[in-house]
Image (cartoon, coloured by chain):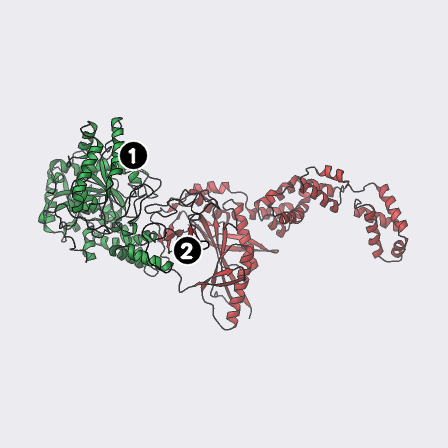
Chain colours: A green, B red
Amino acid sequence: MFNDSLKQLSGRLANREMSSVELTTEFLRRIGKLNSQYNAFITVDEEKSLTQAKRADEKIVAGEIGPLTGIPVAQKDIFCAKGWLTTCGSKMLSNFISPYDASVIERFNQAGAINIGKTNMDEFAMGSSNETSYFGPVRNPWDAAAVPGGSSGGSACAIAARMAPAATGTDTGGSIRQPAALCGISGIKPTYGTVSRYGMIAFASSLDQGGPMAKSAEDLALMLNVMTGFDERDSTSLQREKEDYVRDLDKPLSGLRVGLPREYFAKGMSSDVEKAIEQALDEYRRLGVETVEVSLPNSPLSIPVYYVLAPAEASSNLSRFDGVRYGYRAQAFQDLAEMYRNTRAEGFGAEVKRRILIGTYVLSHGYYDAYYIKAQKLRRLIAQDFKEAFKQCDVIMGPTTPAVAFDLGEKSSDPIQMYLSDIYTSATNLAGLPGMSIPVGFGDKMRPVGLHIIGDYFSEARMLNIAHQYQLVTDWHQRMPKI
Amino acid sequence: MQWEIVIGLEVHTQLSTQSKIFSGASTAYGALPNTQASFVDLALPGVLPVLNRGAVERAIKFGLAVNATINSLSIFARKNYFYPDLPKGYQISQYERPIVEGGSIGIQVGETEKTIRLTRAHLEEDAGKSLHEDFHGMSGIDLNRAGTPLLEIVSEPDLRSSVEAVAYAKTLHALVRWIGICDGNMQEGSFRCDANVSVRPLGQEKYGTRCEIKNLNSFRFLEKAIDYEVGRQIEILEDGGSIRQETRLFDANKSETRTMRTKEDANDYRYFPDPDLLPVEIAPDWIERLRASLPELPQVRRERYVAEYGLSAYDAAVLTSSREMADYFEAAAKQLPECAKLCANWIMGDISARLNKEGLDIAECPVEPAHVVQLISRIQDGTISGKAAKTVFESLWQGEQDVDAIIEAKGLKQMSDNSALEKLIDDVLAANAQQVADYRGGKEKAFNALVGQVMKAAQGKANPAQVNAMLKEKLG
């Protein structure tokens, strides 16, 4: 049952093989058994989850069953959920009970899904290993010595360890796709503006995008159907007709042109990852796909551009955490300035402080043009690269990460090495494009490898179709770590 | 040395929207602390701003009213600084591309007209309020005002005296109320001025170093603060010193300004475009719809009153100082175009004086324009004297409605009956033989005394002109 797809679970509920309360209890038990070891969840609240499950069961009995009714979904602790502790992985919000629901949470509630718990994450989503969380690191279910990736590491771990059938994540520079790759699961970051950011605690507003994480593309499609849609409370939310992301899953792939960026297959990728990626591409060729070489000449700039723009926005977004109205406040201070200083010095971790400092610096008088404005110009060039590439292909493929999961502590003292984990993923955020990662095998130490699929704007349904067709002929997405 | 004063004003006008600029919370004044602060206003984690269309419309209306450029694309920026009443740690404002650029406002100083150029007008949100009393060594924060929409209107340094500055501020105040974008309530902070003041030797082109005086919330304070500041700067310069660029506060009790912060400790606000808000796109047809909705503007009316009713520029300026006043005048003048000047005199004289005394606005005036027209007509046709008219006015003020009925009831009708007046004059002449002799002996003064006696005997009901003529005739 723990390896069931969402469709299978929904079937069990629909034919009354089990109730949502039973299903939820099973997953809660598994979390109870495994979480102390993996630390995937910051908050689990059996009572709240089971109350929701009871309500879902009533709906099911009344014949009102949708694809996610009664299904447990883990929520990244970046989404505000009414009555739930919502920490964003930070000491700063370690006492913050949200008085309201994020748009995404509302949508899952309306769909009858069960919030099975709030997942661990890098502090304020700043990190690629889940080691910056105030609540301790998450471990990779495939190898407890390895990191799960980040920042949505808790969600990725929860799915890989089958503590939840599906979860939400957010992706600012790769935070859904990188942990999905490192934990051997599937995840998609949709086109910017597709999922409402209302109630999703902001890291870098122009890059942040929520998205689903699950075992398979089919599950992702069902999750996206719930998560997406226009929200008037988010001015960057796009007014588009509601899409059915399941609709194209069964389309054949023949004639599909897949672009392989020269720059992604150059040096930088480790050989074990390369091998798995090449095998996956061979599989796609067998499915009738044609591969063409494309170029993204400005892609080497994406990390430097990202690390100017994201911290700039973050430095401002995180100003509200000042100890005045909610969250952590320092105990000892003499005056207002010291209250601010001590609160922020004690409430934020080192990586968050580093980024606030970088962001403050690049926005400062005299540096703004040289850093922020320059980065904005380069951002347009990066987006232009993709536009050109999509003239020659339908989707782009490459590795999600340059290497498999690294060990805990391996990169935590070297921020640059850590930042390079997102070398293939951050460009899509800069361009606002959708990107996804699906498991395509294992590399060194039997750690998972993810294939990165980048689509043109609003091509999520096609991307899910491409991933689904692969998953029909492979079983990497069904492999479970031995735990 | 002769000094020239240079002043530019930044005026924060609170836009009269029902809800805040980026949230749905009410903007009503005077609610209990924090009862009008939504999750957005409190800057809870995860909340996002959504722009209030009404605020944008009001800004566009203003731009149209001052003949400014309405930018088809304007951008909201974040102004970053920490303060407890600034919940997000940044204020959403406009920086590089404001919604309104350029434009001008004509002001009237005495009989002189002057055009003051505007630099820009931009939309922004207000901060909350820190309360320092009643908290025993702590401060309270009230976020009801946080997120209230403001239009900051910045003038060029075109003002040359505190009198001009006040005239400009008053004209602007009248304009924003006139076009219905701001209630203009200065006590509630709906209209607040910052004054940038500098002085330079007369004839010098380069501006002197300026100081900014913050938060002047009355025209009187504006004038006093500028006068004090000008004096302070001239004194320093004449003593051979130099002005330090700084922000100053006006102490109303002492009528002086003092340093708030110097340039050195000014914040680096780290402005950058707010990624939570899209650029504001304003289509030409939206602008045209709003242009069509604008009332006749005060400047236009002012010119029309001069041309159409023959008023002086000064009178026209006073009468257009508010839309209510202008409408009142026009309601009267339309019925009595040949007596427009008299209507103006009544409104600017007796009516304004009485309103001031009672602390009322012209919209609350118990005497209606139609009554004023009746009253003036009765003076004009000789039915009552100017003095009697004041008595009639008093009755109208007290709520009576019919001018003729009042005249009748109070017996205020002038003696137009020549024979009655003639008898009265004969009696006065008989009783004042000495003055008659004096007048005939060449003492002109004696004539006035006789007029006075006749008027007295007539209990004010005689027409002075008529009395004059008849007396002259009788005394030969």
**Residue neighbourhood size for the residue with mark 1, other residues' Cα within 10 Å, grouped as few (<14), some (14–19), many (≥20):** few
Tell me the tag on residue B138.
2
Taking A318 as reference, is B133 left or right? Answer: right
Q: Are marks 2 and 1 on the same chain?
A: no
Secondary structure beneath disc 1?
A: helix
Residues B33 and A207: in front is B33
Question: x and y percent of residue B173 in the render?
Answer: 53, 50
* Circle 1: residue type: Gln
Question: x and y percent of residue B124 in the render?
Answer: 42, 50
**Residue neighbourhood size for the residue with mark 2, other residues' Cα within 10 Å, grouped as few (<14), some (14–19), many (≥20):** few
Taking B422 as reference, is B376 left or right? Answer: left
Taking B100 as reference, is A389 left or right? Answer: left
**Which quarter of the rendered picture does the N terminus of chain A lie within?**
top left
Secondary structure beneath disc 2?
A: loop
Contact (Cβ within 8 Å) of mark 2 with mark 1: no
Does any portion of residue B203 appear in the rendered image? no
Residues A366 and A1: in front is A1
Numbered label tally:
2
Question: x and y percent of residue B166 in the render?
Answer: 55, 56
- Read off the chain for label 2: B
Does any portion of residue A216 appear in the rendered image? yes
Residue at image coords 39%, 63%:
B265
Residues B74 and B210: in front is B210
Q: Which residue is mark 1?
A: A110
Residue at image coords 29%, 39%:
A105
- Read off the chain for label 1: A
Kindly indicate the quadrant of the structure image that contains residue A372.
bottom left
Question: x and y percent of residue B402 in the render?
Answer: 70, 37
* Circle 2: residue type: Met
